[in-house]
Amino acid sequence: MDIEAARRWFLSLQDSIVAGLEAIDGKPFRRDEWTRPEGGGGVSRLIEDGDVLERGGVNFSDVRGSRLPPSATASRPELVGRSWEAMGVSLVLHPWNPCAPTVHLNVRMFVAQKQGAEPVWWFGGGMDLTPYYGFEEDAVHFHRTCRDALAPFGTDLHAKYKRWCDDYFYLKHRREPRGVGGIFYDDLAEGGFERCFALTRAVGEHFLPAYGPILLRRKDLPYGERERDFQCYRRGRYVEFNLVWDRGTLFGLQSNGRTEAILMSLPPLVKWRYDWKPAPGSPEERLYTDFLVPRNWVDGGS
Amino acid sequence: MDIEAARRWFLSLQDSIVAGLEAIDGKPFRRDEWTRPEGGGGVSRLIEDGDVLERGGVNFSDVRGSRLPPSATASRPELVGRSWEAMGVSLVLHPWNPCAPTVHLNVRMFVAQKQGAEPVWWFGGGMDLTPYYGFEEDAVHFHRTCRDALAPFGTDLHAKYKRWCDDYFYLKHRREPRGVGGIFYDDLAEGGFERCFALTRAVGEHFLPAYGPILLRRKDLPYGERERDFQCYRRGRYVEFNLVWDRGTLFGLQSNGRTEAILMSLPPLVKWRYDWKPAPGSPEERLYTDFLVPRNWVDGGS
């Protein structure tokens, strides 16, 4: 297990993704470095009012503690009292154009250490897509790129991680998926460190190939007030998921994390409206009927 | 203990508050009745795009279950297995004018029953004010009206319930109070049903006297883009509190409550912006330095 190699890779992934996004947007991301009183710190890369991205963050963080919190050891009693380190890259992008989907990526590594014992480590990660006006070819491309990332590591992995993503990014209080999904995994240690690190690298490095082409072909499509309004309304669901259900966000906010970095996932402009429903047959209704439903996107959405 | 009398009063409180608000706004509230598959239901009264209120809800609900959930009996093991009924009025108002504060009121009653045993009941409630551009006279008036509501029930009550409110409506992840506070209480059974019901009636019936005059004198003050922008930014804190910290909201969302009624508390238009800080000496900074700090408002804000 090589924590330094992991740190180097996470930082270089952040650099690559930011460079790729800057090339598409045309405006630079700002950079904020921070340290955490309890240990560790991070580098936040942020954009607001870009030419393509209305708001987005690509954050590296490496936080440490002397004792695992009870929430982390409840299901792993053998880790009680260990020191810990959590490191990763987390990203959410909110484009201006309602035809361009919001996207999320997270790749992370967790290590729990104790003097005189082998370190215990695991990886987690995933990416998922949240369209406002859906395009089947975008969902198919995104899912196929996720499948390609995982293909070298086992033929059954993609189906498993896609299902895990669908289960995780689900708004129970709306009985609605957050978007068209992607992949999600956690507690990955099977096959040893090199394999799990390689799998996580593959996921991270497939982010730009998965999302870049979608952003490029949607960023300049025409839209008006109506599409913007629907986008702002649907963004409310993103807020609801992240603040009510997302374990990562809640853990960060409730454990003295860096609030401004964590909440970069929230959209710049959001609307709530009582009991709103799309008009039958409208493009807005198509999001609900054709995209926020379980579909086998790698096979073309059948 | 008279549940029917409580229900009648809650429903009449809703009627009175809606009538008072309609008189100020000039537009009618819509009415939505609903039933809950597991038992009970409610009446939602809502306004959107009013002349004074941008969005607001005054909701009555009366929900029941055959067994108290574990979260409710963790600290009251004697209630395990009892059927329950929770009834109350909950209100949040978001005015258009950034000089007019957002306000929240909740009054509620809880009853746990079992064959052959005395019913166990308690009351809870409170109201609190969240200004964007603060006015000392508004905070003083609101707190004095809260004090007056509680005065007949004990001289120490107001101080105790004000502190409880400050503790409850606090955003730990921002190290910031939600607003200028008010009063909050829960688990109230001391002194018997008649006293506790009377106290709760007094709180509910002091809502219009507490908030009405503030809304009337602020609703037509001039404002522009800048004030509107700050209001939308600060409304983000309201969303964060309600979705991350508010036990009532979370209980509702996680227990198959009526999502659209619960989320009427969320503002119609919200903005998030990275690491934003008010300019030194600006009116926006005054909110942080003069209002989002502990002050003894009943004594004039000393």
Image (tube, coloured by chain):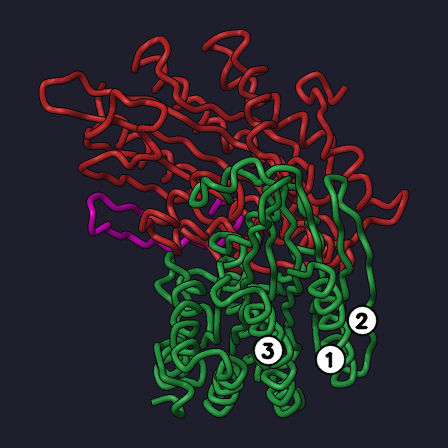
Chain colours: A green, B red
Q: Is residue A139 above or below residue B210?
A: below
Total numbered labels placed on residues in the image: 3
Q: Are marks 1 and 3 on the same chain?
A: yes
Q: Position of residue B202 (x, y in %)?
A: 43, 21
Which structural element holds mark 2? Answer: loop
- Residue indicated by mark 1: A21
Which structural element holds mark 1? Answer: helix
Q: Amino acid at mark 3?
A: Ala
Indicate left or right for A178 with B34 as reference: right
Looking at the picture, tell me which residue is in the foreground, A216 or B249: A216
CB within 8 Å, label 1 to label 2? yes
Residue interval drawn in magenta: B20-43
How far apart are the alpha carbons under marks 1 and 3?
18 Å
How packed is label 1: few (under 14 Cα within 10 Å), some, or many (20 or more)? many
Query: Chain for mark 1?
Result: A
The residue shown at (49%, 87%) is A144
How packed is label 2: few (under 14 Cα within 10 Å), some, or many (20 or more)? many
Q: Is residue A198 above or below residue B285?
A: below
Indicate left or right for A154 with A120 as reference: left
